[in-house]
Amino acid sequence: MKKIIISVLVGVFILIIIAAFVYFFAIFQTPNSGQHTGYITSVEKTGFIFQTWAVYVKTDPQSSQEDTYCITDSRIIAQLQQYEKARLPITVYYAAPFILWTWQCPQKASIINTATPVTP
């Protein structure tokens, strides 16, 4: 009987640790995917504990609205930095998973998968 009680207490303790981990490090959002054509205004490293990359995209250079995306692939980071310097119009393809971990992106945002320059 004592072994059963200890097993139940250990199981409850493990569940509490898992729940606390998910509470502090997971962001739940509605999954989506799509594309956005515009101009990269900034590619920057953000975060205090978890260093992540954020990209800011404007549909029109004169617009005041700016959309924020996250990047997890280092090859795309370098590519987007080149597009930012060249001020070329590009199309970014993004997706948002159901669970976004804080080491991927600290806020609710989509993750850029690929980027291609717009051809005239």
Image: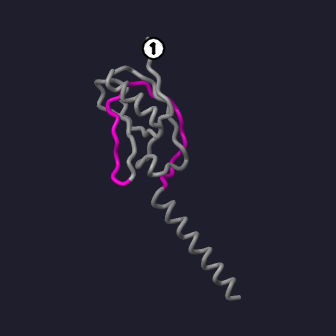
Residue lying farthest to the top in this orientation: 120
Residue lying farthest to the right in this orientation: 1
Q: Which residues are magenta?
A: 26-49
**x, y percent for residue 109:** 44, 42
Q: Residue visible at 37% across and 31% down? A: 57
Q: Nearer the viewer, residue 35 or 55?
A: 55
Q: Residue visible at 38% across and 39% down? A: 54
Instruction: Say what amino acid the circle numbered 1 marks.
Output: Thr
Q: How many marks?
A: 1
Q: Residue visible at 55% across and 47% down? A: 98
Left or right of residue 112, residue 83 in this image: left
Decide: is 48 above or below 83: below
Examine the structure image and report whether residue 45 is included in the region drawn in magenta. yes
Q: Quadrant of residue 66?
A: top left
Q: Nearer the viewer, residue 28 or 16?
A: 16
Secondary structure under tag 1 reads loop
Decide: is 22 above or below 47: below
Q: Which residue is mark 1?
A: 119
Q: Residue visible at 39% across and 51% down? A: 50
Q: Nearer the viewer, residue 42 or 61?
A: 42
- Quadrant showing the C terminus: top left
